[in-house]
Image: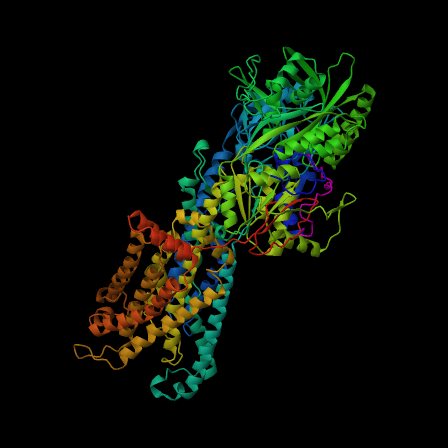
């Protein structure tokens, strides 16, 4: 099979998935970059970031508490009150105390517009001239809403109080008065020397001075900091390791030492400082720091100096406010509430004007209406306006927001409890880490996915390599050939038995020790890395910052170059049968800008110094010496590896003279001591030594796809969800992964964007918004897009561009720290708990263990949540309109005098007790089709993307439906009461009986209407509908009883009204007629929709019924006819594109409905 494609123009470095930490942006900077820098070309490589000069104003002296209280370190708190800028170590995460809880909590809740609105109504109801309703009709619902929220806040804050107390009272050993004494964490101060032991939590951000391990290595677990459970190592300076081991030495480490470092910040991935001790300067970096929240592991004892305490520590600085994500339905719901409020003002104003004219024409002339007040018609109209604001206030639903939160909480629990999203292998359930975005899962239009660890397993296996121009483990498929046997590693007692390699020739070649290139190749792999090793029960266990490094070091180990141990300055390996220790002169670490790492070592008898380097092909090829051999053959092998979806790295070396190294070392030390732009200075120094390299070869690592990825992508594509893969891989690797995971198919036409360069002379081109719009428009015409060679910030920029120009709902999914920016930028962020730690999960909104669970999250839970929420909101607005607008019709017969049509307690309890539970359960439990059919027919997802189930059209349908029902509920009883005679000869045409009949009709109509709208019946739904009606009658008969009237005569005034009215059969007939006429149009419309204009859901539900019918043994032919007639959906072909950071996608219109040639 041949695929038409454009030749690659080169590739940039290894993928950035290996980054152990997130990109350089803090949360605040990301907020600016993702929203405030939309003009950046998507996917374009950014020039090196010019970091701001760090303010090195933070000074620390060891064992000198008085120094940190000097006036120069004081800051103004309020007026003339000052305190030290150095925080104490006590933390405070709680929001309230016993005195501030009520006022602060009320203030926070009343900042919400709905609560403030009802408080204003309550104040209006206290004014006698305005009030037409008792104050308790608003007070009770408001107190319930505020009380429920306050209780939740109180429970949360009490938990924070307990946690703060437990943490602040933890014990640690602090050096005081020359000896270590036990002290509580809250008493620790900046400058204290602290002793920590194995399994102790680290009490503050501490500079590691020494430890019981050789070379002051200290292993820490950072689970509380970033969620990762694998151990990381920290290392003290050599000078402090040699001189600060004993208690006496630590006590003498005092005022002669000064630490200067950056101000407290939230950067978990960087620290910059300098130590001045005995007139010598020593650079400090993150590897020297033990951060609060970590735990000491595999280290018996260590000592450190407190640099940041309490609120200044990095973990506390990262505990700030997160950016709040809101759903489209949230925004629409708020606009609809504003629309309702505007309607309320208009209706109240109209009725007030009506009252003014009515009073002039009738009210002022009727002697029996005289109330003893000398008020003109305009003033009475003004009072009537405010009276109707109170009477019609239930148009603005006070319980709406609380009900929505309850529904979202329940939907989140269903996601957490879904056993089909539980990954038993790692005991990892799905987790909804937010409760505010569930329905947005049913509206996703674009998915932005990382590749490594997200689509793939991120379990690396060394598969192939090329050394000195020759490739190894090249499969030769010869007919009738015997199956190849993996290499037998029994000759190597250190070999990892799980490691498999098929090319026995390479093993024999290395064991012969005759090929210098092969020996140097595996020696480089065993030396050039940052892996740490532990010896557990005689077995070597490697702790690697990335799976790639672990795979390469393990490969070297199996080929006889075994990494045994490392110190600050040495690395010990076993070369075949000989143990050798190499002096490490410098380590030039990897980052996403350099895309390479190097090590400078010496152990040659003649004093030669050699630099080993491994990195991406392009950054390495740019730095190769002109006389370097095997460049063409290695490049050919790299292209072959990439086409097989293997991840590649190039290996090279350079011999350095002692004089050259000495000159470079001085520059290196100066750059290490630079206090501003240290990273940029180091990069410039690294560039001076990493040149004229000699190529050795390249490695190829396999990362297999996760189970179910092709099926998941194919199913999401059928749901019209566009999938973009954002990866740091080479173009060829990314393209072939696209084919293997069904993102690309042979029927698709691939286009590259190499005709447009985003870069000009190494700098970002000046581009206005037009090219960005073109880029987004053209890319979004494609069914799928693959962006290659993108950095973490560029991933976020691509997501931001689609959000900005397409106004689309986006979802980002990733597993590593380098995906955090992308996850935070998208409307929905999904983290996969894979091999790269938990930073992506901790920044996400939803988390699970495998990519394949995404289809269930979206097509089942997301779709159900969207449908449920839309149905809930439509019905909630309807029932409130139907309830409230009865007052409007009643006003035409009451002189527009702000009188109410119902009894006061019915108004109070309508939304709380009589109509809330059935609609709440529909929002929690309803299903139009089951989960199996939801996954089988992805087209069911389309209504959510199109927003057809809840929009302004649906809102006005609910409004007019409410108007219609309110008309029926008012005018049919009104007509029945005009000329009525009861069985006892009395006319039950009084106001109170009328109020009982209208209220009863409303309760029956509303609860039966939600029954008609319920698609999935359970016992709970049935109980809620019948229970709501029963509760209504039970409470009504109680509050209309004579006994309660005797106790509260002014509050309960409808004495005997219910029993008097409902004993009349004529009124029961009126209720039945009212309910029947209210529901009849709805029944007819639903019947027509399901028979003549069925929706996709109706078709699938009908199909599901036929499926059950078949299983019952009925005729099979009818089913096939139905499925063919009702499910003949066509999928329009789209263009697929692959793009790099230099590329832009071009649209190529495929003729609609025509056959697409196989490429």
**Where is residue 622 shown, x and y percent of the image?**
76, 33
Q: Residue at x 68, y 21 (%)?
A: 521
962 lies left or right of 586? left
Viewer-proximal residue among 81 and 287: 287
The quadrant holding residue 287 is top right
Residue farthest toward the left in the current orientation of the protein: 984
The quadrant holding residue 791 is top right
298 lies left or right of 677? left
Viewer-proximal residue among 566 and 235: 566
Q: Is residue 623 within the magenta segment?
A: no
**Secondary structure mostly taken by the magenta-highlighted segment of the chain:** loop
Coloring scheme of the render? rainbow
Q: Is residue 711 visible?
A: yes
Viewer-proximal residue among 1027 and 163: 1027
**Where is residue 877 shown, x and y percent of the image?**
42, 64
In which quadrant will I find the N terminus? Answer: top right
**Where is residue 672 shown, x and y percent of the image?**
74, 30
Residue 265 vertical placement versus 250 (above, below): below
200 lies left or right of 1033? right
What residue range appears in magenta? Answer: 37-61
Q: Is residue 56 within the magenta segment?
A: yes
Residue farthest toward the top in the current orientation of the protein: 577
**Where is residue 805 shown, x and y percent of the image?**
62, 56
Residue 691 vertical placement versus 804 (above, below): above
Q: Residue at x 39, y 87 (%)?
A: 362
């Amino acid at each position: 099979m041949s695929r038409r494609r454009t030749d690659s123009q080169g590739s940039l470095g290894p993928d950035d998935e290996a980054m152990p930490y997130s990109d350089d942006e803090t949360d605040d900077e990301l907020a600016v970059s993702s929203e405030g820098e939309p003009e950046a070309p998507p996917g374009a490589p950014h020039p090196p970031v010019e970091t701001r000069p760090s303010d090195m104003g933070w000074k620390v002296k060891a064992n000198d508490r008085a120094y940190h209280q000097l006036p120069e370190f004081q800051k103004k708190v309020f007026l003339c009150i000052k305190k030290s800028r150095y925080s104490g170590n006590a933390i405070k995460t709680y929001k309230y105390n016993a005195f501030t809880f009520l006022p602060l909590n009320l203030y926070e809740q009343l900042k919400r517009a709905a609560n403030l609105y009802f408080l204003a109504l309550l104040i209006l109801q206290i004014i006698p001239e305005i009030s037409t309703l008792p104050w308790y009709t608003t007070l009770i619902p408001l107190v319930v809403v505020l009380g429920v929220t306050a209780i939740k806040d109180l429970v949360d804050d009490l938990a924070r109080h307990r946690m703060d107390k437990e943490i602040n009272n933890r014990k640690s050993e602090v050096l005081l008065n020359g000896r270590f004494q036990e002290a509580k964490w809250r008493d620790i101060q900046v400058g204290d020397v602290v002793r920590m032991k194995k399994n102790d939590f680290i009490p503050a951000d501490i500079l590691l001075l020494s430890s019981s391990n050789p070379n002051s290595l200290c292993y820490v677990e950072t689970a509380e900091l970033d969620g990762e459970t694998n151990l990381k190592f920290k290392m003290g300076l050599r000078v402090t390791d040699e001189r600060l081991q004993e208690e006496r030495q630590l006590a003498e480490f005092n005022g002669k030492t000064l630490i200067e470092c950056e101000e407290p910040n939230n950067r978990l991935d960087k620290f910059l400082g300098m130590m001045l001790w005995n007139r010598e300067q020593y650079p400090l970096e993150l590897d020297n720091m033990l951060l609060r929240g970590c735990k000491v592991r595999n280290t018996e004892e260590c000592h450190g100096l407190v640099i940041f305490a309490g609120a200044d520590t990095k973990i506390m600085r990262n505990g700030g406010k997160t950016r709040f994500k809101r759903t489209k339905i949230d925004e629409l719901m708020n606009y609809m509430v504003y629309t309702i409020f505007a309607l309320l003002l208009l209706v109240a104003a109209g009725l007030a004007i009506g009252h003014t004219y009515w009073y002039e024409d009738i009210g002022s002339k009727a002697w029996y209406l005289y109330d003893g007040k000398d008020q003109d018609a305009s003033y009475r109209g003004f009072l009537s306006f405010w009276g109707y604001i109170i009477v019609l206030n239930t148009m603005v639903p006070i319980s709406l927001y609380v009900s929505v939160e309850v529904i979202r909480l329940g939907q989140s629990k269903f996601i957490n409890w879904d056993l089909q999203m539980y990954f038993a292998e790692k005991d990892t359930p799905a987790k909804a880490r937010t409760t505010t975005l569930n329905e947005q899962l049913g509206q996703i239009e674009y998915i932005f996915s990382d590749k490594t660890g997200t689509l793939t397993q991120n379990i690396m296996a060394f598969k192939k390599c090329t050394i000195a121009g020759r490739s190894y483990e090249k499969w030769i498929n010869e007919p009738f050939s015997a199956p190849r046997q993996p290499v037998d590693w029994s000759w190597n007692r250190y070999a990892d038995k799980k490691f498999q390699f098929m090319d026995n020739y390479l093993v024999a070649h290395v064991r012969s020790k005759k090929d210098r290139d092969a020996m140097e190749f595996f020696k480089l792999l065993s030396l050039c890395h940052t892996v740490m090793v532990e010896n557990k029960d005689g077995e070597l266990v490697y702790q690697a910052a990335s799976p790639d490094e672990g795979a390469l070091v393990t490969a070297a180990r199996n080929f006889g170059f075994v990494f045994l141990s490392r110190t600050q300055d040495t690395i010990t390996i076993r070369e075949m049968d000989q143990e050798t220790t190499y002096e490490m002169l410098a380590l030039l670490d990897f980052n996403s800008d350099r895309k390479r790492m190097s090590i400078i070592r010496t152990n040659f008898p003649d004093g030669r110094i050699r630099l080993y380097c491994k990195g991406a092909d392009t950054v390495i090829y740019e730095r190769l010496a002109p006389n370097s051999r095997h460049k063409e053959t290695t490049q050919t092998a790299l292209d072959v590896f990439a086409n097989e979806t293997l991840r590649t790295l190039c290996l090279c070396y350079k011999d350095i003279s002692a004089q050259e190294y000495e000159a470079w070392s001085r520059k290196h030390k100066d750059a290490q001591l630079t206090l501003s732009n240290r990273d940029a200075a180091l990069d410039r120094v690294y560039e001076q030594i990493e040149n004229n390299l000699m190529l050795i070869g390249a490695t190829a690592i396999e990362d297999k796809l996760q189970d179910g990825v092709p099926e998941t992508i194919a199913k999401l594509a059928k749901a019209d969800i566009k999938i973009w893969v954002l990866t740091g891989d080479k173009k060829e690797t990314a393209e072939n992964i696209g084919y293997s995971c069904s993102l690309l198919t042979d029927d698709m036409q691939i286009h590259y964007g190499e005709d447009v360069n985003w870069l000009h002379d190494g700098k970002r081109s000046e581009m206005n918004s037009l090219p960005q719009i073109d880029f987004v428009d053209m890319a979004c015409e494609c069914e799928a897009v693959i962006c290659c060679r993108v950095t973490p910030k560029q991933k976020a920029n691509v997501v931001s561009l689609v959000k900005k120009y397409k106004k689309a709902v986006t979802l980002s999914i990733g597993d590593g720290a380098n995906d955090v920016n992308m996850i935070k930028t998208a409307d929905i962020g999904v983290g996969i708990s894979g091999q790269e730690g938990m930073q992506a999960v901790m920044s996400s909104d939803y988390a699970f263990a495998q990519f394949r669970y995404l289809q269930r999250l979206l097509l089942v839970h997301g779709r159900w949540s969207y449908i449920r929420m839309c149905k809930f909101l439509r019905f909630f607005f309807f029932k409130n309109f139907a309830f409230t607008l009865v007052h409007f019709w009643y006003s035409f017969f009451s002189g527009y005098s702000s009188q109410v049509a119902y009894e006061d307690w019915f108004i109070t309890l309508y939304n709380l007790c009589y109509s809330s539970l059935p609609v709440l359960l529909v929002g929690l439990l309803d299903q139009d089709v089951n989960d199996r059919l939801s996954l089988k027919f992805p087209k069911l997802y389309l209504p959510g993307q199109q927003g057809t189930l809840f929009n302004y059209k649906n809102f006005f349908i609910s409004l007019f439906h409410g108007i219609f029902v309110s008309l029926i509920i008012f005018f049919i009883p009104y007509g029945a009461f005009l000329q009525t005679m009861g069985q006892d000869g009395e006319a039950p045409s009084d106001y109170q009986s009328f109020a009982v009949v209208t209220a009863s009709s409303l309760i029956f109509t509303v609860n039966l209407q939600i029954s008609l709208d319920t698609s999935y019946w359970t016992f709970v739904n049935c109980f809620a509908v019948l229970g709501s009606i029963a509760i209504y009658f039970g409470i009504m008969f109680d509050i209309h009883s004579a006994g309660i009237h005797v106790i509260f005569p002014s509050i309960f005034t409808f004495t005997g009204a219910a029993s008097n009215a409902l004993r009349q059969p004529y009124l029961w007939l009126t209720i039945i007629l009212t309910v029947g006429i209210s529901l009849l149009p709805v029944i007819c419309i639903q019947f027509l929709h399901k028979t003549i204009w069925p929706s996709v859901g109706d078709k699938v539900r009908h199909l599901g019924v036929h499926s059950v019918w078949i299983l019952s043994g009925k005729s099979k032919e009818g089913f096939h006819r139905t499925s063919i007639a009702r499910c003949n959906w066509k999928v329009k072909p789209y263009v697929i594109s692959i793009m790099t950071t230099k590329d832009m996608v071009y649209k190529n219109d495929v003729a609609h409905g025509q056959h697409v040639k196989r490429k």
